[in-house]
Amino acid sequence: MKINLYTIAFLLFGFNSFATVRFVKTNGTGDGSTWATASPSLQLMINASSLGDQIWVAGGTYKPTMDPYNSGDARNKTFYFGTDISIFGGFAGNEATLSSRDWSKYPTILSGDIGMANNNTDNCYHVVLCQENAGKIVVFDGINITNGKSSDTGGGLFSLNANPTFNNVAFYNNYASNSGGAVQSESSTITFTNCI
């Protein structure tokens, strides 16, 4: 079989060359294709993304809207990740490069405080859920994950059979009745770099 240089280049780089960047702002009104047309919904952009895509999220507070179990219990709402994508926070909302962001100045907050403000009895069970995506790696970078309250485990993050990577991520004010107030990992490999 004859394989030329173009074929090799496609095999090495072809998939990533078609990756899409989507944009999210708290006050967005668009389809997420640019900062000017940013989407207000992080979950919609997650759902629209596929292998290798990136989501750039401006500073602000975002709350889960998806119940992956269709349970009718609002506390099951979570940011649900089931594919190999990267989510970057810390943007003012006009940057052209990842290196221009500042997650200290423009914190991107994923909050489980979906009910009565500052009352955690009606907060999400898991702010972030990475589930059943073995062999895939979801990357979080420059994100704050807070205000999850689980009646079992994993108030901030519950990872089941997944391989998420966290860079420059802060977990705080998360709680679980049994274990893993911030993070619960089951059959997962999680990587943390510069996280608190």
Image (cartoon, rainbow, N blue to C red):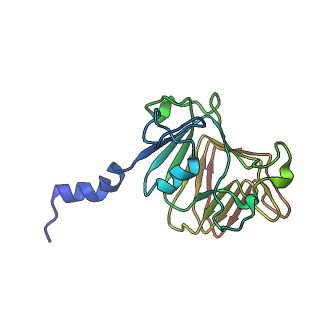
Going by the picture, which residue comes out furthest to the left? 2
Report x, y in % for residue 188.
Answer: 62, 66
Identify which residue, 124 or 108, lies in the foreground.
Answer: 124
Q: Is residue 177 above or below residue 97?
A: below
Total tally of numbered discs in the picture: 0
Residue 26 as seen in the image, left or right of residue 18: right
Q: Residue at x 60, y 40 (%)?
A: 142
Residue 21 as seen in the image, left or right of residue 105: left
Q: Is residue 92 above or below residue 164?
A: above
Identify which residue, 139 or 4, lies in the foreground.
Answer: 139
Identify which residue, 193 or 35, lies in the foreground.
Answer: 35
Which of the 4 image quadrants contains residue 9?
Answer: bottom left
Which quadrant does the N terminus fall into? bottom left
Q: Residue at x 56, y 37 (%)?
A: 25
Report x, y in % for residue 23.
Answer: 49, 40
Q: Residue at x 50, y 45 (%)?
A: 55
Which quadrant does the C terminus fall into? top right
Q: Is residue 38 above or below residue 11?
A: above
Report x, y in % for residue 179.
Answer: 81, 62
